[in-house]
Image (tube, coloured by chain):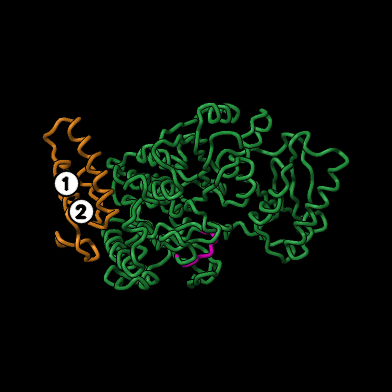
Chain colours: A orange, B green
Amino acid sequence: MSEQTDIIGRPIDGTEAEILALYRRLKAMSGRDDLAPCVTMNLREAAASLWQIVVDLDLDWEHPYDQGI
Amino acid sequence: MANSSPYWNPKNETMPKEELRALQLVKLRRLVERAWHESPFHRRLYEGAGVSPEDIRTLDDIRRLPFMTREDWMANQAELEPFGDLMTRGREDAIRYHLTSGTSGRQPLRVLDGRKDWKWIAECWCYGFWGFGVRPGDTVFFAFSYGSFIGFWGAHYACEKIGALVMPSGNMTTENRVRQLVEMDATVVCATPTYAIRMANEADRLGIDLRKSRVEKLILSGEPLGAKAMIEERWGAKASDTAGMTEIGTIFMFEAAHQPGGTHIIEDHFIEEVIDPDTGEPRGYGEIGERVCTSFGRGFLPLIRYRSRDLVKKLPHTHSDCGRTFDLYENGIIGRADDMLLIRGTNVYPLAIETIVREYRAVEEFRIRAFTADNGVDELTVDIELTPGSVGEDERARMVGKLAEDLKRNHEGLRINVEIAAEGELPRFELKAKRLVDSRPRN
């Protein structure tokens, strides 16, 4: 998927792009195993919430269990 | 904007239909691809049918995929205890364990969910609660036991997400629930239709007039809603019909605030087909058939073309003028394909009987008994239990006769017996009611 479109090819706006970037950063951090439990688990909670927005807005569709989400 | 929007997800709820279908196709293709690679159950199912992910090019290609049935899933869990091999992940990745209700007496299904699945389960409930007008500032009372049955668990978290004040009532008696929801000024009550009636009966017994309470909205789920008008009248509140399944973990449809006579399907998260329950062939708008569900959100458990046995009648989104482009089910779930009784050549649906029985305010509880009489003839009897003191002795025979006549008139002249049960004789229910007892010999 292009950074500029959602999963059916429609352009995404600035807010959506920001949400997608936030999600991807949180997802990457959620997969780290060098952080304290309070950091990792809350990151995963936050990432799961961001995942929900990303799916609701059709920005991506995936199941990121490998990152603990 | 947030609180003034009538839609939880304006982007998708009002999306042009062709874009909605494109979205469903993208999700379907990815879902099938994922199931093929990560769910041995689905791989076997699809290889057996000679179909692979590459065959899904259009939305109509969904019909190339075989149906998935509860029986297959149950057999799979029995063979590979405890969870079978439908799941895409191991239990170490799960955060929740739940069971189906086992209403029909069968072995409950065991289900697991991951962290994001649980967010999604709450999210679908948010579509319904928000769409019916629940907002921050509401006080939502859950008449629910919070056990292994998934029931209203997701709805609870949805209300927290919305920002409403949530009041759980897990271990409370019915009396305590009624007292608390009134004393604490609940504005929304969530329950099964059966339990909403039971609470109304209890309120009568306590001398509490629910119509004078702060309750404005009832969110009802777990059973077909055959007594909506009566429930709304007794509570003095609007009722929203919703329906879900443990197999998907959440709801797939909801009734919006303007009550258009049907329930919108959450079509950005589900594909809902309607088929002939006997032939499997698709049925069009306005035709009654069995709903078949494909769910996009629950990653642990790919549910693709799942036979629900629920009977529905789909209407185009234009039936409603709320701006949503999601299709509707007229009057929600209108029955169960496997609940239909054949009595002396006439089809009888328990929900149709309930709808008639509920017109009689004095009936507190009822039961439907199908049995074979000594002369070998199938009989159908409706046992009714009356609210104490509601009908005088001299009036009972007349009421029984009138109810029997109403039932007969609505069932092609079929004689249906009506008998009065003793006070406290019939079972009471909190979740899904089991009012049908069919003791006829099989075959």
- For the residue pair B294 and B407, the one nearer the viewer reads as B407
Q: Residue drawn at (72%, 44%), measured in percent from left and top?
A: B361
Q: Which residue is mark 2?
A: A16
Q: Residue drawn at (13%, 40%), measured in percent from left and top?
A: A32
- For marks 2 and 1, give the CA distance: 10 Å
Q: Which of the image's four quarters has the N terminus of chain A?
A: bottom left
Image coords of residue B428 (percent x, y): 64, 37
**Foreground mark, 2 or 1?**
2
- For the residue pair B417 and B321, the one nearer the viewer reads as B321
Q: How many marks?
A: 2
- Farthest right residue in view: B394
The label on residue B117 is: none
| Residue B77 visible in rendering | no
Q: Secondary structure at mark 1?
A: helix
The mark nearer the N terminus, 2 or 1, is 2
What range is drawn magenta here? Answer: B309-317
- For the residue pair A1 and B148, the one nearer the viewer reads as A1
Image coords of residue A26 (percent x, y): 17, 43
In the rendered structure, does residue B314 fall within the stretch colored magenta? yes
Q: Is residue B432 left or right of residue B23?
A: right
In the rendered structure, does residue B22 fall within the stretch colored magenta? no
Q: Residue drawn at (19%, 49%), measured in percent from left and top?
A: A19
Q: Residue drawn at (19%, 44%), measured in percent from left and top?
A: A67
| Residue B265 visible in rendering | yes
Q: Which residue is mark 1?
A: A22
- For the residue pair A22 and B97, the one nearer the viewer reads as A22
